[in-house]
Amino acid sequence: MKTVLITGGSTGIGAGIVKEFSKAGYSVIFTYKNHKNEAELLAKEYGARAFFCDITKMEDINTLKEKANCVDIVINNAGISDIKMCSLINEDDWDNIVNTNLKGAFFISKAFIQGMINKSFGRIIFIGSMWGISGASCEVHYSAAKAGLTGLTKSLAKELGPSGITVNLIAPGIIDTEMNKNIDPSVLNELVSSCPVSRLGKPEDIANLALFLASDNSSFITGTVIPVDGGYTI
């Protein structure tokens, strides 16, 4: 049985990934930061293990590494968003977004890479965003951090490929999660109407691709950025 670590697994896309990997027979570990109750309920229902971890803090990552021990697959899902005009973005805003969405994703991955190398097997999956591909107005810092994951994905794929580790990025479109509940309905309707499949995505849409990329069937796929956005970025 392979072990998967999912960051930010208590709600939204992360919770969807936890559910699908649990149902597929994986040993599931996931992290949470702000949703302890949701994490505990999810862990109990699906037989997973939940750990608190602020991925912007190295001490938390080191503690997680000690608790999680041997991990075969890392899915870097934890992330935050912030809608703000570029003229209003201050240094703290920038650092909060970049430290969580980019820096944290790298150091979580780094913590488990050596264990993968020792086994000559590993899967690292980053959850990016279609805004990392096309850019989003009023989300400059978010788009930049998600775009940074593309460079991270491709660089790690080249470095780790000889060790039997694949590295890929899933770029979701607008997914029906709590994070997007605050989007103005008129803006949301416009986004949906601009999407060729004319609907919001579901967490399972992301989870199903993650399952494939984690499997042996994807062993010749690495360094890719795969949009799951209903065709929005065509």
Image (spheres, rainbow, N blue to C red):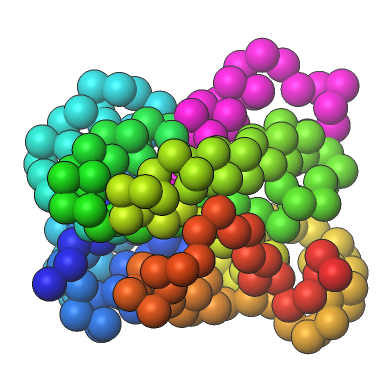
Left or right for 85, reference 25: right
Q: x, y (%) of residue 29?
A: 21, 57
Is residue 90 rendered magenta in the image? Answer: yes
Q: How many numbered dots are placed on residues in this image?
A: 0
Which residue of the protein is positioned furthest toward the front in this rendering? 162
- Can residue 124 be seen here? The reply is no
Q: x, y (%) of residue 68?
A: 14, 46
Left or right for 138, reference 40: right
Q: Residue at x 74, y 82 (%)?
A: 199
Q: Residue at x 63, y 58 (%)?
A: 225
Is residue 29 rendered magenta in the image? Answer: no
Q: Which residues are magenta?
A: 74-103
Q: x, y (%) of residue 224?
A: 59, 59
Front residue of 75/123: it is 123
Q: Residue at x 39, y 79 (%)?
A: 217
Q: Quadrant of the N terminus?
A: bottom left
Front residue of 109/98: it is 109
Q: x, y (%) of residue 160?
A: 39, 44
Q: Residue at x 26, y 82 (%)?
A: 24
Left or right for 153, reference 196: left
- Can residue 70 be seen here? The reply is yes
In this rendering, the answer to whether 28 lies above or below 124 is below
Q: Quadrant of the C terminus?
A: bottom right
